[in-house]
Amino acid sequence: SYELTQPPSVSVSPGQTASITCSGDKLGDKYACWYQQKPGQSPVLVIYQDSKRPSGIPERFSGSNSGNTATLTISGTQAMDEADYYCQAWDSRHVVFGGGTKLTVL
Amino acid sequence: QVTLRESGPALVKPTQTLTLTCTFSGFSLSTSGMCVSWIRQPPGKALEWLALIDWDDDKYYSTSLKTRLTISKDTSKNQVVLTMTNMDPVDTATYYCARMDYGDYPQEGYFDYWGQGTLVTVSS
């Protein structure tokens, strides 16, 4: 079955750029999206179709997808961005989530 | 305004069947491209996709759980129901329902609205 691999954790200083990767076989041939989940809350869509940003999501969130890797980039990271982030894609008739990355802002 | 709300038992015993209902508003599951899915998250762990049903009553299931899952919809009631048989303590998780509007192709889809989730504990 198809797998998406994320680093378990990423750390970033406030104001710096955070990059979270998601790897899968030929992931660039699929659409990737990203969800943010804060403790005790439901996931929130932050990037869809590789690089599109839903209404209400700050411009500091951006995405890219090429080859085997999709990347979520947060520019000028703020303390409020500390959360778990999950990538997601489709493979055949299945939805697949990555294992999640805990972003720490310190 | 799109909303989804999960309902079902908070506690089930091992070997029992779990039935969860997702009641939604603000969209119609008879609209082309519209879907509702179930996703779960064990405490402290990652999201796991379970099943999805689309506007055309096409159903998609997790390979690993397919034999235990059934998803169905009642368009007139704006509800999607998930049943999971033979529950085990490892199935303890928060269960979410979420909406997907995939447009023309499922592979373009993403979950744009989520319910608040319901915690299901499996214990004797």
Image (spheres, coloured by chain):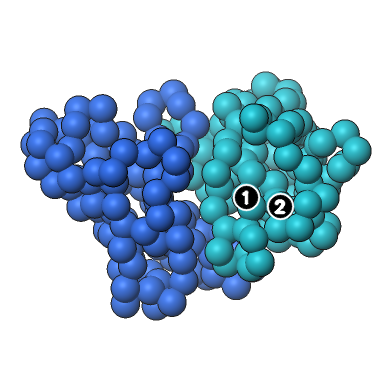
Q: In the image, what residue occupies the spot 24% across and 39% down?
A: A103
Q: Position of residue B31 (x, y in %)?
A: 78, 52
- Check disc 1 and report the residue beneath it: B100
Q: In the image, what residue occupies the spot 55% across and 44% down?
A: B112
Identify the image quadrant of the N terminus of chain B. Answer: top right
Q: In the image, what residue occupies the spot 15% across and 40% down?
A: A76
What amino acid type is highlighted by mark number 1? Met
The CA distance from mark 2 to mark 1 is: 6 Å
Q: Quadrant of residue A39?
A: top left
Asked if residue B59 lies left or right of residue B10, the reply is right
What hue does chain B carry in this figure?
cyan
Q: Under tag 1, what secondary structure? A: strand
Asked if residue B73 lies left or right of residue A90, the reply is right
**Residues tagged 2 and 1 counted as in contact (Cβ below 8 A):** yes
Q: Under tag 2, what secondary structure? A: strand
Q: Position of residue B124 (x, y in %)?
A: 68, 24
Please tell me which residue lies in front, B49 or B36: B36
Asked if residue A55 lies left or right of residue A75, the reply is right
Which labelled disc corresponds to residue B90?
Answer: none
Query: Same chain, marks 2 and 1?
Result: yes
- Check disc 2 and report the residue beneath it: B34
